Image (cartoon, helix red, strand yellow):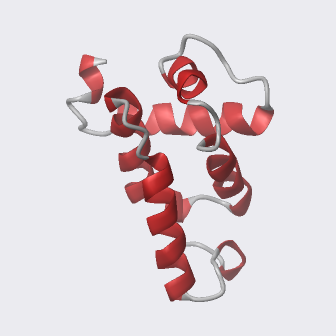
Amino acid sequence: MRSRSTLSESPQDDKLELKRLYWHSRRGMWELDLLLIPFLKHRYSLLAADDRRAYRALIEEEDQDLFQWLMRRQLPDEPGHRRIVQLIIEYAETTDNDQYRTL
């Protein structure tokens, strides 16, 4: 269960944040959407505050960089990015997301 320190000021703020993050996570590149959207929907709310910040920073990066990192072609230089990328990949690999296995 999340501690209050990882939440926004109100449940309404949390909903608005998730909506904003959803639209920023939709990249228009099928491979990225397939990894980011399920992670956002199912894991983001369970993350610690540092990991949430890392996710928000990650989705500000360029699509080509995200693709390289999430397809395991390169590792991000920034440690926070590296950690959240690993969490996203681990989530995709441990769920029953059959589409992920086609990547």
Residue 40, given in percent of the width and then of the height, sits at 45, 53
Snapshot quadrant of residue 6: bottom right
Q: Quadrant of the N terminus?
A: bottom right
Q: Is residue 102 above or below residue 18?
A: above
Q: Residue furthest top?
A: 73
Quadrant occupied by the C terminus:
top left
Q: Residue furthest right?
A: 78
Residue 4 sits above or below residue 72 on the image: below
Residue closest to the eye, 37 or 27:
27
Q: Residue 68: where, in percent of width, then height?
A: 55, 17
Residue 51 pos. (x, y %): 67, 52
Q: Residue at x 64, y 52 (%)?
A: 56
How many circles with numbers are drawn on the protein? 0
In this rendering, position of residue 24 left or right of residue 3: left
Write down the quadrant of residue 7 in the picture.
bottom right
Horizontal arrangement in the rendering, residue 5 relative to residue 10 (left or right): right
Residue sitting at 37 percent across and 30 percent down?
A: 29
Q: Is residue 100 left or right of residue 75?
A: left
Q: Position of residue 82 (x, y in %)?
A: 69, 30
